[in-house]
């Protein structure tokens, strides 16, 4: 047997130096983690013992690493490991994460709380050579990062901060692992075909395939016909939308909305309470009143007052329309239920598990449109062509699949991306479908950032989008909903932010921007999903090749704002919940479930059920970096509507406007204040008007 060499400890030797997923073993991670820590410590000793006067070049930049990446090992292995922990984990990976997390957090604290290292950085911050704007941003971020990590605290304060951050990192990991286990543990198994009533063929076929896969190892596996539904969105959403079986909808809804609240090892209630208190104490230790005050110092919103002003403005603008939407839904529900149950004396009340079902019925009544009508025109390979074609039309870039690039799962496709002049731009991974070891939702991440070497070489990024889109079945290819097309466009927008990165320093490149700016490129791309000229480029029937009919496109456009106010209030409610936790000045001792229902009630129109809980599965604010920042989605929506209005005025494919968007926003990363970048593209600050007009809240006058 040949001796195994840890691929992290030598040059990868792969196309574009991509991660050699096919050569990595589980044991390689721990060895590389520990070697990375050793190299970091070696670098630290060299830096703090450098006899030369601290300068930007010998302290902020890395003077000991001549572009060979020797001291980048820990970042390299951490990136791969934690990306896979979300996209392709297993029990052994989870156990290793539990083992390594406290070691890694302690090491990070050792670096950030080293007084000699901070003193060198402080001296450079006070006395430095003339810097470029990008160098100044890097220095300010470095200095502020150390201060916000406790560098100015006394020894007792530093020790307490260590304890708090180490506990918080472990609990965040535990939260995510619990959520994944709970979501994957539930299945709804159906063996009576009558209980599939209302479900479209795509949902039935996917459920039959899921049943087959789940029972393949059992004796007499093929003797019984069955259908299996899960809490993954491609399975859950069609069932809630189409199933006529109200009790089964209730069962599925309650399963999804009570995960991590049960009396078992995956209960997240106490973890959430503790995380809120840990973050509050961290912020107060660092001199802030609340965790929200700490976070918002480095956000476009800048303070709590401005966040609440945005959320309150949105409630004022959208709530009257949302009430009309609710009343229309209730009216339809009452009419249908009344005709169904004339003999029943007790009046049936609309419940949360009825919302998607009757929203679909109302959409059919008003627009004669539903997701299944569109599915045949959104075959995944054609959608990929459409999204790539859009990027080509806007920016001139092209995508070429390269099967020699290793991937971590057969679902993943890897592409080389080339700029309009034919030069290599990036590597792009796309991971499309749900599976056992994969978190729900969709996200963009990276395996390599962009930066300039000392020799002037532009190191290009490797970016990845991870989604949970409808899977192919034995009968059909992967046929997406319009919502899934929007999800793809959203994550692809993030990836363009990464791929177009063109800065000197990796920590300022791509998506390394303030969190209420990072959603602009992604939400901007969603606008194209309902544009006829875009749909015309790829929406062809998967069997006949016929283009999506004009009449259907008209219905899509007309129905664009269907339940838009309700959707807005949903996002606002989550922003209110987030702020309620992280504006706490005193210890949080409340019962999570009633606290949640009180926190967001002014944005909630439907009935709140006593046992359901969002907080315990709200990864964004508990484990995903959006704590005190969930408002960012609505903040960026104001920006994206405003930005897209420029494209609408000049033409949605206008290359000059697209180039300006690329040059001023997508390629600049965090090298300047985001409002400076935005105004350079837009010519002024954004207003909420474009969003209100897009959603039909405010008249859109045309002349």
Image: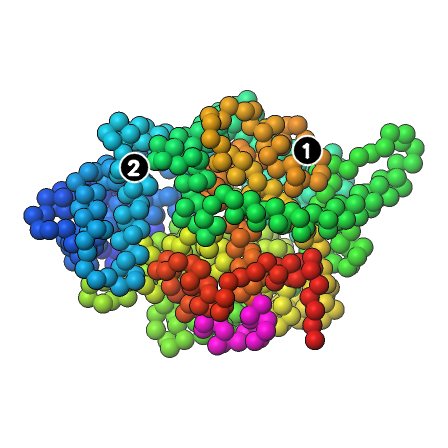
Coordinates of residue 606 in the picture (x, y in percent): 71, 38
Q: What scheme was used to colour the molecule?
A: rainbow
- Tell me the residue that label 2 is attached to: 150
Q: Is residue 299 left or right of residue 324?
A: left
Residue placed most toward the observer, 63 or 585? 585
Q: Can residue 173 be seen?
A: no
Residue placed most toward the observer, 234 or 535? 535
Coordinates of residue 474 in the picture (x, y in percent): 60, 53
- Tell me the residue that label 1 is attached to: 608
**Residue at 59% from the left image edge and 71% from the top image edge:** 648
Can you say whether 430 is above or below 26 in the image?
A: below
Q: Quadrant of the N terminus?
A: top left
Give the crowd class for mark 2: few <14, some 14-19, many >=20 residues within 10 Å.
many
Circles 1 and 2, Cβ within 8 Å, touching? The answer is no
**Residue at 68% from the left image edge and 31% from the top image edge:** 609
Give the crowd class for mark 1: few <14, some 14-19, many >=20 residues within 10 Å.
some
Can you say whether 129 is above or below 319 in the image?
A: below
> Which region shows up in magenta?
645-660
Coordinates of residue 371 in the picture (x, y in percent): 68, 55
Q: Is residue 670 left or right of residue 476?
A: left
User: Which corner quadrant of the image does residue 543 belong to?
Assistant: bottom right
**Residue at 63% from the left image edge and 64% from the top image edge:** 530
User: Which corner quadrant of the image does residue 42 belong to?
Assistant: top left
Coordinates of residue 412 in the picture (x, y in percent): 45, 55
Task: Give yes or no for residue 408 being in the magenta stretch.
Answer: no
Can you say whether 621 is above or below 261 in the image?
A: below
């Amino acid at each position: 047997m040949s001796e195994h060499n840890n691929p992290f400890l030598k040059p990868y030797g792969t196309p574009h130096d991509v991660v050699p997923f096919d050569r990595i073993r589980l044991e390689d991670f721990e060895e590389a983690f520990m070697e990375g820590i050793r190299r970091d410590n070696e670098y630290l000793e060299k830096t703090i013992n450098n006899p030369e006067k601290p300068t930007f070049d010998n302290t902020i930049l890395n003077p000991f690493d001549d572009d060979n990446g020797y001291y980048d090992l820990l970042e390299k292995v951490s990136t791969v490991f934690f990306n896979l922990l979300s996209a392709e984990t297993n029990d052994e990976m989870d156990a290793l994460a539990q083992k390594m997390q406290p070691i890694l957090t302690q090491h990070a604290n050792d670096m950030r709380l080293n007084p000699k290292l901070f003193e060198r950085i402080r001296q450079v911050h006070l006395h430095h050579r003339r810097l470029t704007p990008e160098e100044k941003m890097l220095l300010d971020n470095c200095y502020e990062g150390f201060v916000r990590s406790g560098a100015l605290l006394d020894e007792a304060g530093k020790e307490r901060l260590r304890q708090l951050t180490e506990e918080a990192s472990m609990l965040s990991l535990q939260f995510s692992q619990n959520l994944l286990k709970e979501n994957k543990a539930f299945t709804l198994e159906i063996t009576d075909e009558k209980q599939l009533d209302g479900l479209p063929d795509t949902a039935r076929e996917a459920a039959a395939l899921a049943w087959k896969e789940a029972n393949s190892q059992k004796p007499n596996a093929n003797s019984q016909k069955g259908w299996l539904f899960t809490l993954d969105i491609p399975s859950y959403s069609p069932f809630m939308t189409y199933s006529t079986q109200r009790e089964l909808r209730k069962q599925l809804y309650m399963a999804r909305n009570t995960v991590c609240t049960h009396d078992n090892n995956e209960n997240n209630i106490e973890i959430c309470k503790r995380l809120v208190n840990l973050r509050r104490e961290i912020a107060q230790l660092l001199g802030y009143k609340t965790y929200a005050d700490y976070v918002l110092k480095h956000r476009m919103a800048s303070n709590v007052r401005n966040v609440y002003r945005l959320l309150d403005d949105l409630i004022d603008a959208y709530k009257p329309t949302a009430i009309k939407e609710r009343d229309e839904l209730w009216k339809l529900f009452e009419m249908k239920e009344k005709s169904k149950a004339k003999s029943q004396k007790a009046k049936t009340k609309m419940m949360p598990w009825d919302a998607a079902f009757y929203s679909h019925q109302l959409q059919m009544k008003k627009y004669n449109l539903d997701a299944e009508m569109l599915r045949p025109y959104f075959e995944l390979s054609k959608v990929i062509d459409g999204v790539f074609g859009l990027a080509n039309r806007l920016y001139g870039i092209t995508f070429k699949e390269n099967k020699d690039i290793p991937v971590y799962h057969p679902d993943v496709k890897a592409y080389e991306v080339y700029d309009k002049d034919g030069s290599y731009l990036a590597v792009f991974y796309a991971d499309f479908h749900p599976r056992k070891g994969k978190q729900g939702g969709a996200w963009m991440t990276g395996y390599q950032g962009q930066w300039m070497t000392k020799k002037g070489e532009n190191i290009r990024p490797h970016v990845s989008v991870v989604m949970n889109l409808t899977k192919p079945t034995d009968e059909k290819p992967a046929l997406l909903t319009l919502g899934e097309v929007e999800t793809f466009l959203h994550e692809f927008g993030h990836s363009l932010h990464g791929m177009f990165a063109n800065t000197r320093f990796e920590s300022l490149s791509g998506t390394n921007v303030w969190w209420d700016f990072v959603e602009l490129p992604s939400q901007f791309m969603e606008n194209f999903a309902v544009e006829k000229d875009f749909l015309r480029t790829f929406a062809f029937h998967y069997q006949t090749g016929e283009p999506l009919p004009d009449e259907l496109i008209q219905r899509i456009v007309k129905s664009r704002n269907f339940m838009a106010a309700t959707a807005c209030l949903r996002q606002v409610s989550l922003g209110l919940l987030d702020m309620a936790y992280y504006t706490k000045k005193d210890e949080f001792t409340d019962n999570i479930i009633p606290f949640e229902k009180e926190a967001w009630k002014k944005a909630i129109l439907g009935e709140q059920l006593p046992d359901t809980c969002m907080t315990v599965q709200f990864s964004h604010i508990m484990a995903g970096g959006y704590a005190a920042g969930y408002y960012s989605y609505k903040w960026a929506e104001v920006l994206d509507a405003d930005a897209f209005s420029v494209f609408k005025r000049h033409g949605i494919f206008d290359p000059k406007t697209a180039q300006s968007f690329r040059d001023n926003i997508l390629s600049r990363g965090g090298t300047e204040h985001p409002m400076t970048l935005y105004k350079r593209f837009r010519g002024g600050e954004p207003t909420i008007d474009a969003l209100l007009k897009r959603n039909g809240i405010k008249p859109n006058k045309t002349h």
